[in-house]
Each structure stands twice: as structure tokens, then as C-alpha cells.
Image: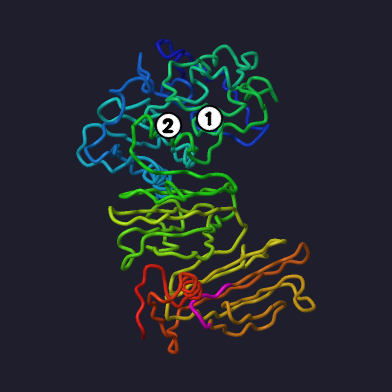
Amino acid sequence: MGLIYQGSGDRTIIDISNDFRYKEAEEPEGTFSKIMKANKDNSIPVHEGDMLVKNGRSATTCTQCLWPKSANGLVKVPYNLSSSFGPSDLSLFQNAIDKYETLTCIRFVNRKSENDYLNIVSSKGCVSYIGRLGGGQMVGLNTAGCMYRGIIQHELNHALGFYHEHMRSDRDDYVTINFQYISPENVANFNKAVTNNLGLEYDFGSVMHYDKWALTNTSGKPTIVPKPDPNITIGQTDEVSVLDVSKINRLYQCNVCAVLLNNNNGSLTSANYPSAYPHNASCVWLIRTPSGQVSLNFAAFDVQSSPNCKSDNVKIYDGPTKRSPLLLDKTCGTGLIPPIIASTNQLLVEFSSDSSVAGVSFKASYSSVQCGGTYYLPERIITTPGYPNSYRPNLNCIYTITALVGKRVSLTVSDFQIEAGWFCMYDSLEATDGTVNYGPFCGSERVPVITSRGNILKLTFVSDINEQRKGFRASYKFRKNRSSKVREITTQHSSKEMNEWIHLGFIEFGQTPTES
């Protein structure tokens, strides 16, 4: 039996189990359709489809309904996960809460002995109360239908104090509710609430928004139509949006410097750029492109140099959190950082400064690429996209391998099958260390072991629109460069020379070189 509260202040419970209809065939399922499917046979009384609301409460206008902030400025939300969640569920849950840790002051932590906590269970559909109630309050995340990153965040946002976006008090300025396609017993799901909109604009892309077809009773007829463009996408299940993050930080007055960048391309700069960045700064930029892999290119880089970059520095992570693998460890000094390509569509940039000298920091642009990567680990395997299945047409993949200064990159190709052509004019693999070019290679020829002269080796793989094959599999290792010497830099050398030496690998950012 499906049950729903009629209105936020009415305890009347209406049975909707005999006329449960929602649209899912006209376009991909949105958040609400997935939640309602999971809640179809749920016997728990809910309001607005998934909210376990107590009478007379509006968490976004109720300060005592918020989770308390500790002296260090963090908001800890203890939780207990049911033992019915398997390893893949736990991994997905961790991935979902990582975004809060990266971009807000919210910290979802395992419960120890706290009195107030989230009791997260699998058997009750996708449901949550609004805000903190006190004691162990239930959050339902059924493993059969709720384990999507966006739905997990949706229910956790309810627990933090957020209503559905279409319930905003000003929603009629942004969407039209087609009540003629909503059955009388479901009208309460589209009631407006007295909400604190936090001075932020309406968010069509919120993970808290219903989809267009939510509870429609007429095939092909949407219940929610965005204004002024009816084609705007609503009801996404990916994860929290830029404005979702801003709302959390405003509601909880988080003193964090964190930016979410989620377009196909864009730019980022340090604070005050091109003037000097502030002292004692700590900022992160999470880049999350809609698809592909993140490509990051620096146009300027000037960060105070110090031994081992202990003072001011930039770190870059291959993923959305500081627990992700490092693409670039602590980096400082002047010069340009080589282009960086993440292994996924997410990349995290972290900047820290102390109380001493400040530089002008950095300016960078990002975009989405189909393939490629940036590698700093001592050894790793590299393959074409989809290997051992056929690679895609029209690829242009760049793999940049950077060893420590004083070492070289040794690349071994163990499997190589790409389209053959005269002078490899169709599909090809090439390599360069900045001094010597290797290739192009194509067909099924044997690719010799390639060892760079410096500490950087760049691979470029391209394919055209025609024939696609298995591709290649290669591995690399860093080897000691017995003939390398690190040049001494004195005040008589120009900054241009220093930058050139950095680029060529004779010195590294933040290093104080000596004659070897």
C-alpha cells in the first residue's frame, strides 16, 4: 500500500496504492520517478513522495532543525548503516558523501555514541525526514531501487533540511504545474511550502527537483514545465548541482572556499588573480564535466617557492576528493605545468598558502576530452579506450608520462593492433620526449621499447572515421638517468632560462638545485 500525507499540516493519510501512475516511458527516468518506483509498495506514511515529515515543521526556516556546528566550523552528521548494505552499496554511499566533504562543511561520519544520528536502512524505500529530529531518525535507501548517487544525496539533503525544489515559495515564477494532468489524490505532492530560499536562484538542475513526468495521469503530458524554456532538463539523478552546494553552504554558514565547475569547459583562477593571492588560504576547485575526461591547462603559474613546497602549493587529484590518487603533488615556483588529463570526468585542484610571501598564483582552463591521461606514478598500464574491444572512431588521445627529475621513462608495448595505412595516415601511435620523435606506428607492427631522453614522454593516438581495431596495451617504468645532471641556477640566469629548464625537466617546481 502506498501512503501519502495531504499537506504539511494535515495528518490525513490517503491510500494511493490503487491508482499509482507516473510517467517513465517518454524520457529517461528522473530522480522522482526512480524514487516513486522504489516506494511503490512502501507502507510508510510519506509526504511529497519521499519525505517523512512531522507536523508543523519547515526545516529550512527552523534553526533548531539543523545539525549543530562544532568549534572548528564543521557540521558532523553521524550515521549508522544497516548491515544489509553490500560492498558495492557501501562504495557508492561513500562516493556520494565525499562531495559534501570536498565542497561543504558537512561531514557524514560513522556514529560512535552520539544521541542524534541517521539510521540508514535498506527496507523502507527511498525516504527521509526533513532536518534533524533528535535521536536515531530513519533514512530509507532500498538497495533494490535507491542506490544511485543522486538519490542518496537527495535523501541526505532532506535530512540536512531541504525540501524539493519545486516546492519553493517562488516556484510559480520558474515552472508551470499542469494540475489537469495530476489526479486529485496526488495534488498534495505539488503544494508549495514556506521555504527559506537563501537568496539563491531557482535551480532547474537541482538533485532535489521532480522530473517533468512526475505523477502524470495522461500519457505524454508533463506535470511540470520549466519557464521560459520548456526543454530545460529537470529531475537529474547524477549528483548535487552547483546551486545545491551553495544552498548547503549558506544554510549552514560554511566558511569554506570551494567551487564546483560542471560545464563542458571553463576556467579557474586563484583569489585576486592577477594580483597576489591572500595569505592563509585554503581553496579547492572540483571540476566535473558532463562526460569524457577532464583536461586541465595552465596559462599562468606563480606560487611562492619553498623547499619541498611546504609553504604555498597546488595539488591536483585524479578524482573528486583528497583521497583520490595524486596527479600532481605539492607544486610551487614559477613556470607552466604540463597539460593534465584525468582518468575520469572529475578532477580536484587544491591550493594552500601560509602567512608569508605570496605570489600571483595561477590561471587555468579546463575542457572535456574523450581519452588520454596524465601519469606520475612510477609504473602503470596504458591502453586505448575500450581495450581489448575496438577503440572508437575520430579519437585524439594524448598520454603524458612524467618521471621524477633525473629519471627517464621506459615504455613497452605488449599488444598492438590498429588500422594500417600508407605512412600510417589513418590511425597511428606516435611518441615524443621533446627532443626525439618515435613513430608513427600502425598496423600490427612491433613497436620497439621507447626510452625518453628526459623525464617526460608524450604519446599521441589518433583514429579516423573508418576501420577500428583492438588498439594497444603498453606499460611504462621510470629508470634512472645515469647521464643526467641537474643544473645550478644562480642570480645571473634569467627567469626565461629557468622556465625553459623547468619545462625540459632539468629542475622541478620548488626545487633548490645544486650541481651534481
Q: Is residue 454 magenta?
A: yes
Q: Position of residue 59 (x, y in %)?
A: 36, 22
Residue at (68, 65) in percent of width and height: 390
Name which residue type carries label 1.
Asp
**What residue is disc 1 on?**
203
Q: Secondary structure at mark 2?
A: helix
Residue at (41, 82) in percent of width and height: 486
Would residue 163 appear left or right of 183 to someone viewing this image? left
The 10 Å Cα crowd at callout 2, few under 14, some 14 to 19, many 20 or more, is many
**What residue is disc 2 on?**
247
Residue at (67, 69) in percent of width and height: 470
Q: Are marks 1 and 2 in contact (CB under 8 Å)?
A: yes
Would residue 419 appear left or right of 112 to someone viewing this image? right
**What range is drawn magenta here?**
453-458
Q: Position of residue 17 (x, y in %)?
A: 52, 20
User: 511 or 151, which lies in front?
Assistant: 511
Q: Position of residue 80 (x, y in %)?
A: 30, 39
